[in-house]
Image: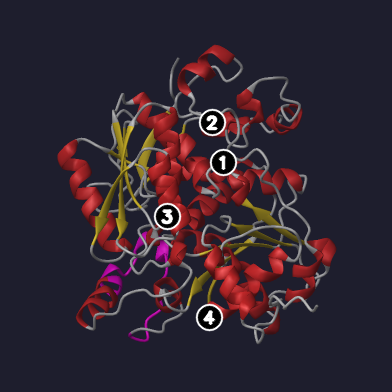
Amino acid sequence: MRSGAKKKCINPSCGIEYSIDNDIYRCSCGFLLDVVYDEIPNKNLIETFYQRRNYMGNIFNESGVWRYRELLNFVGIDTEDIHECSKFLVSLDGSEGRSSRPYQMSKVANYVDIQSENFYLQPEGYNPSGSFKDNGMAAAVTHAKLLSVKKIVCASTGNTSASAAMYASNEDLECDVYIPRGEIAPGKLGQAFQFGAQVIEVDGNFDDALSLSLINATKEGGYTVNSLNPFRIEGQKTIVFRIMEHLNWNPPDWIVYPGGALGNISSCGKALMELYKWGWIKRIPRVLVVNANGADTFYRLVNGLFDNSKLSWNGGKIDTQLIERFYRYQDINKISPKTLATAIQIGKPANIAKALRTIDFTNGIVESVDDIDMLDGMAVVGLNGFDCEMASGSVPAGIKKLRKKEIIKKDEVVVGVLTGRQKDPSLAINYHLNKSNMFAKPPRDHLT
C-alpha cells in the first residue's frame, strides 16, 4: 500500500507541502491546506462508478462517498480489494451519500420560476445522521484512524456534532463536541447525546466554540473534524460527483449552497477544479452561495458592503486585513450572528479563503436572504414531499432572488444542495400556525 497523497498550502505564493501522516490542517504561512494527489485519474472510472451502483453486497460500492474512492484515495489502498477497503475506509454500512442525488421538484421550480425539467434539488438529509456532514466525516474519520487517534473533536451548531458522534460511536472512538449554549436545535443536541458524545457547552456563539475546541484539541491530543480539516473537504467533494453523475457528467449552469462555515463551498470548488483539470468536465458551473441576512459576513465582504472594499481571491493574495477589520468591527460593536437558521449562524467562517477561491474559479455569486424567505423555501420543499431544515431553505430563496434579478435565466440548469433535514419541528409548526405566511396551512377546528 502506497499513498500518492500529500497536503499542500492553498496559497500559490507559498505551496509548502506536508505529509498526510499528521493532523496539521494549517500551513505555517497561515493558509489552509488541500489534499493533493500525484496521478490524474482515468476517465474510464466513470463507467466503473456507474457499474458500482449495482453494489452486489459491497458496502463501499453502496456508499455515495466510497463509490468514488479512486478520486479520494489518500490512504493509497487497492480500491478493488474489499479486505483493504474494510480495513481502512470508515463507513456506516455504506449509508453515507447512498440516497443523495438530484431530484426534480416541480413546485419548487414553479416557486423560483425555472423550467421544471432543468431544476434539481439534492437532499443531503438522506444521510444517516440527517445532513451532508456524513460525506466529509467518513473521510475525516478514515484519516483519524490512519493516525491511530483515540478521540475526535469538533465545534458545532448541531449537524457536525451529530455526525461526528455517530461515526465516533461506530468506530469506538471518544468524541468531544463544543456547542454554543442555547444555540443548537434540540433534535441535533439529542443526537450528540444519543451517540455518546461528551457535550461541552460554551458561553458564546459557534465561533467561540470553534476557537475553544481547537485549543483543547491541541492540549488534549484530540483530532479536529471540523471543515478546517482538509480530509473533511475530500469527503464532501462527492456531493458534486453525484450531481455530475446524475447529469451524465454534463455540468449544470449553477450549483447552489447555503453559506455557513463555507466548507461545502470549498469542497465544491475543489471538486470542480479537479474535474476540469482532469478533463472530466468541459465547462465550469457558476456557484451561488446564500447567506442568512443575520449571518452575512461572506456576503458583505465579497460584495464590498464594508469599507467599500470587495474581498476576493486575488490569486491567493487575499486582503486578510480587511477580514480582520470586519471581525474587529463585529467584536467592538458586539455584533453576533443571529438567524433562526442556526446551522448557518456563523460570523467568522473558517473556510473563507477556500470559498473565495471557489467564487473566483466559478465566477460565482454570494447572495443574502431574510429568515422568512428561508422559511418559505423550507415550506415549499415540503410541499414536494421532501424534508429540509431552515438553512437549506436559503437555496430556493437565493435562486428566486437571482431569478428576479435576471442573473439566473429561466431555462438554465440549476442544482441546489439541501444540506440537512429538519431537526427543529417548532420552526415548521410556528410557520404553519401563522396563516399570513406564504405556504401556511394552519390547523382548523373539527366542526361537529
Which numbered tag is attached to residue 158? 3
**Residue in the picture at 60% in, 30% down:** 94
Residues at discs 2 and 1 in contact (Cβ within 8 Å): yes
Q: Earlier in the sequence, mark 3 or mark 4?
A: 3
- Please tell me which of labels 3 and 1 falls first in the chain: 1
Which of the marked residues, 2 or 3, is nearer the chain's N terminus?
2
Residue 374 seen: no
Q: Nearer the viewer, mark 3 or mark 4?
A: 3
Q: Which mark is residue 370?
A: 4
Circles 1, 4 touching at the beta carbon (< 8 Å): no
240, 59: nearer the viewer: 59
- Circle 2 is placed at which residue position? 92
Q: Earlier in the sequence, mark 4 or mark 2?
A: 2
Q: Which mark is residue 128?
A: 1
Q: Hey, which quadrant is residue 112 in on the image? A: bottom right
> In the image, which residues are magenta?
307-323
Question: Residue flagged by tag 4: what amino acid is it?
Answer: Asp
